[in-house]
Image (cartoon, coloured by chain):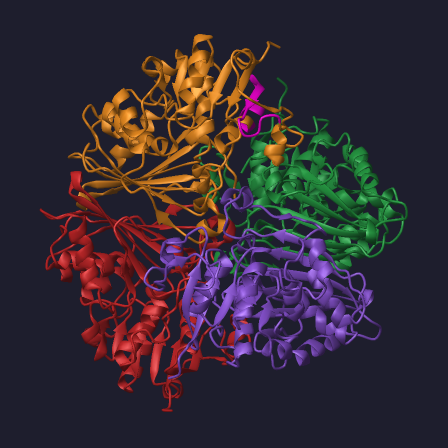
Chain colours: A red, B orange, C green, D purple
Amino acid sequence: MTKKNRIAVIGASGYAGAELVRLIAGHPQVSLNLLTSRQYAGKSYAAVFPSLIGCIDLQCELFSSPESIQKADIFFLALPHKASMSVAAPLINAGKKVIDLSADFRFNHLDQYETYYQPHEEPELLKQSVYGLCEFYKDQISSAQLIGNPGCYPTSILLPLMPLLKEQLIEPIGIIADSKSGVSGAGRSPSLGTHYCEVNEGFKAYKIAEHRHAPEMNENLSIAAGTDVHILFVPHLVPMTRGIVSTLYVRCCPNIDEMKIIDCLSSTYENSPFIRVLPKGLFPDASHVRGTNYCDIGVKYLADQNSCVIVSAIDNLIKGAAGQAIQNMNIMMGFSETDGIDMIPFPV
Amino acid sequence: MTKKNRIAVIGASGYAGAELVRLIAGHPQVSLNLLTSRQYAGKSYAAVFPSLIGCIDLQCELFSSPESIQKADIFFLALPHKASMSVAAPLINAGKKVIDLSADFRFNHLDQYETYYQPHEEPELLKQSVYGLCEFYKDQISSAQLIGNPGCYPTSILLPLMPLLKEQLIEPIGIIADSKSGVSGAGRSPSLGTHYCEVNEGFKAYKIAEHRHAPEMNENLSIAAGTDVHILFVPHLVPMTRGIVSTLYVRCCPNIDEMKIIDCLSSTYENSPFIRVLPKGLFPDASHVRGTNYCDIGVKYLADQNSCVIVSAIDNLIKGAAGQAIQNMNIMMGFSETDGIDMIPFPV
Amino acid sequence: MTKKNRIAVIGASGYAGAELVRLIAGHPQVSLNLLTSRQYAGKSYAAVFPSLIGCIDLQCELFSSPESIQKADIFFLALPHKASMSVAAPLINAGKKVIDLSADFRFNHLDQYETYYQPHEEPELLKQSVYGLCEFYKDQISSAQLIGNPGCYPTSILLPLMPLLKEQLIEPIGIIADSKSGVSGAGRSPSLGTHYCEVNEGFKAYKIAEHRHAPEMNENLSIAAGTDVHILFVPHLVPMTRGIVSTLYVRCCPNIDEMKIIDCLSSTYENSPFIRVLPKGLFPDASHVRGTNYCDIGVKYLADQNSCVIVSAIDNLIKGAAGQAIQNMNIMMGFSETDGIDMIPFPV
Amino acid sequence: MTKKNRIAVIGASGYAGAELVRLIAGHPQVSLNLLTSRQYAGKSYAAVFPSLIGCIDLQCELFSSPESIQKADIFFLALPHKASMSVAAPLINAGKKVIDLSADFRFNHLDQYETYYQPHEEPELLKQSVYGLCEFYKDQISSAQLIGNPGCYPTSILLPLMPLLKEQLIEPIGIIADSKSGVSGAGRSPSLGTHYCEVNEGFKAYKIAEHRHAPEMNENLSIAAGTDVHILFVPHLVPMTRGIVSTLYVRCCPNIDEMKIIDCLSSTYENSPFIRVLPKGLFPDASHVRGTNYCDIGVKYLADQNSCVIVSAIDNLIKGAAGQAIQNMNIMMGFSETDGIDMIPFPV
């Protein structure tokens, strides 16, 4: 047996980091070798996530160059925005593969990033990074050294819309994305907004048309459409742990019908193991993709309005974060695309 | 002390019926005198809803004419569609006040009802019935004998939209209502769709652009707009017991801004004790209205698109059903509009 | 109309404080006049609890002597342990009625308090305080100036057990209390332990035989039994917002049977409006008392083991905190015992 | 590659059946070949469990002898009690391996089964069946043809208690099991008791000291203890989908302490890959084992009472049903014990 590639998860104490750890631990081609956490350095990882007692016996370390760099071949960065960019630079210089789950390497246009986030300290790296939406940028990903892993909301919105814009089945204007996310999307740091009693038996919209995932979507939708796209994006918080459902309202181009929409999506994703375009009349449910890397898509065409309602569902921590990151690694490394992420959905 | 008006709840074994019973039991002006249920006739009501042991000591009876008719002055019908119309007729003939929570008396246009439901057996009664959207039809309600109590989804959508259409601040075309409801809206009859494990940790759209509440909305929105309105209505199921949040996407008329929208709503509802138009920057949460008769409304104007996102929240069993029915009774009987439904929201 | 008693809630920004505010706002005999919060001083109360917009228009103030003292006649202290005792002293000296929801005035024995909490700074006040378990200490409460309002777990355990110990129907040894609480019992301050994702779809025991509510229970159970009682108390966390269910395992004295147990409880609580002793074969559910001041009690006698399983349920924020505090006020002030807390349970 | 063993799931439309299907589909040594369901015969399995679209493409069939018998080598029966026994007979006669998830083959003593269930139609089969508590009866399982897979509650209670009774560290009398289960344990058939709104935000005990899992526990506890054991078993319903937590109250034999208890459990389970005996001071949480075949056990010794609180947690659908059934198959077939069930716990 050949030696397995060694993996590091930098920033392993959040939910995305922990989901990465779980998936890597079950991956047939790689082995976990380094976990870092500023907050928990020196503690065993299973003390931070007690569900992992007996499963993971690594300790949390501080990331320090150059020692940490030598401990792995592939680095997943599950750090907050801005923290990633400075960590990525020495890793890239050392020839490591880097998959970054923050927003730091998701943009093609520096100005977009700087408008919505902060000044970028590694603009050259940003240029060489590839946006890790696996189903669309597979070729670039396969030869990339640095991946900007997509945001959870953008994944749920880009996968259904990009083929339809590209094939000019829907209009590039007037697109509305009404998205609903489980609470794990807010991260593991305690706050009043994630307090059980504040979320349970509640439902609300937040950051209406102000969420920073919108420019990330717009950039990629515009590429697909070949023209500027500005969608109206309204996220909501659902009292559940995992899952994103996006309900998309789009205007159809002339002479379109439901089967043309479904056929476009089906043929686009014919060889994509993680996209399930549902048959006419069926629609996604967050619970149907929970614990998996699937993105489910359902379509309802409204003839009288020549418009379309498209619904998508993903597990925000898997296809929306850690699972897609593993998929990116699989593509970069030439593994089977489904290695380590071929989970079958739970019945409940 | 004057003798209290006697109340009957016909069809008391569902959630709306039970919520009526609870609210009536705490109402200062009326007293509960008759509860009917086909399924539970002969059983004590507290055996059907064990939370009410020691609070309600009536038995469930079968509704039978003329005995049942003599037992009350005001009748709330919490029956399925179609069952209501035949029960209503003898009550109306006997001079009783009737508030019907089904769809049977909600429509102005017979053909609308018959298109979306079934043939109507009491078209004359339908003509004389008043749609019980209290904030809009108060005058007619105050002199009505028969009320068609609005549906839960329509209540959450009409209250924010009707003033804006009436004042021509928003366009009557292209309106989208993306609504999210708790599970109690599906009623108390067990089904796979309301099984705990099928709902919990899930989220889905259903009856996309096919829900029978849409024509009820369209009829009233058209009255407000003075022109035909056809909205696109997509309901979703949220893993929570109570609450509806509707996210409404509307196109604004020229020269509108956020304050004009908020001011229109605020002045319309200045004397409406149950409508809370939230200050700029605040948005509703289902948990903020749970257990109350409030409808909360928040507004976000998008200058670059000259459109508006309006979010509303109600408790579907109260403002969306039993509470609004009590409010209708209060108006019909000349009680204070808030009698028996002036609950203060829970902190959690 | 006589002038209403003015109420202050000191420490109004936690869940118990907010529940007090809600209940006081709906109470017919008193009016809310002062809300204090160190964390939110200067903010409107409705900004802290947005569900209360339009319902409560007081601002949060800093508690400062003597200004704050003059603003109310009755003071509810919803402060952390230790913070209460120093606030209580000047209030008592000024002749105010004080109902303290912390542990500071719950104990008869100074040493018990100091063993499980910290040195007591007002031991003389502790002596004059009355333990506010309304159903047992009503006479003392009616003439008290200072009440130590019982803990939530103790309330759920003392109400079923004290009559049985007093009447010597059950043995004072070997009592086990396996209690299950909703998350609001942990308070509003964010922590990993109350994070939605950490609680949801989980269930765990905590502080096994180490919870500080045990000595409070033991002191009162011993009074009832006339001998030392030490129960084994194991609390658990349930993924729900409100409610405590306690499953109590007791050994029966000779010649006891189920009806003797039920009869003892029924006759003890014959005139207690908030205790519902359920008929043989029925058992409590947290959802049946949610939003109310009820304590439900069900009994199962096991002849072959001459032992008994008793199950009780309360709403931890109402009968376990704010509701019982109001009940104490009602008794102290000579109001009807049910004023402001006579809520009828929700069907769901 | 050798030909994979063909698997049948008889009664595949319930939650245990569906969980079996999911686990078998991911198992490296076997392949799914037959799914039967009386209710859904003729429908595709993915129409019954839409989360499985694209994952399982079998149709539900009616079980019919002898055709169905020839379609598989190993049969899992996920049928209701009583239905299993008649299906098992022809399978056993045909030389098939059978793992039955009902109670029909769990008992050593015919009279126990017949007292708590109904007359047994296959008493000879009952005699040859082996109780599939893997960690205790591994040798018999490895050579068995027919397995009675343990109940969910018994699994959570027997695993912590049997070693302690066998080693005489705890007394065989006075054992109390206070268990709490998620809703999936009630099965997939809709009923008022599993309606989302009836369960959500509630918590209750049920079948107090009357649950049919108690005799199954008593039989095995008595074998371990070498004397008759009768535990007091009180199950409760938790508003969550998966998981059982059992809080066990036991009296210790003389000269016992916490480490002796922990050491006994640790050494018993030294080579058991699915039992995690937690270090002193740590206790299980249902969420830590969700989605896995683990049984977690934590111990708290109470010196002053010479008694012990032991807490265990399992996923009721996995270690409590389908996972343990796969584990039994692995042992019977000589596969690695962890094949197909070596899932790593979710962080949330």
Q: Nearer the viewer, residue B71 or A331?
A: B71
The reply, left or right, for residue D113 in relation to residue D147 is right
For residue B32: magenta? yes
Q: Which residue occupies 29% across, 20% down?
A: B108
Front position in the image: D21 or C256: D21
> Which percent across, then down, holds residue A54?
55, 77
The x, y position of residue D143, in whole percent, is 60, 79
Residue C132 lies in quadrant: top right
Q: In the rendered structure, which segment of residues is drawn in magenta?
A: B22-42
Q: Is residue D248 visible?
A: no
Report whether B59 appears left or right of D341.
right
Residue B264, image quadrant = top left
Front-most of B217 and D61?
D61
Horizontally, residue D296 falls left or right of residue C304, namely left
Q: Position of residue A20 (x, y in %)?
A: 40, 72
Reply above or below: C338 against A280: above
Q: Residue at x 65, y 65 (%)?
A: D126
- Image x and y of residue D336, in percent: 51, 81
Identify whether B30 is placed above or below C308. Answer: above
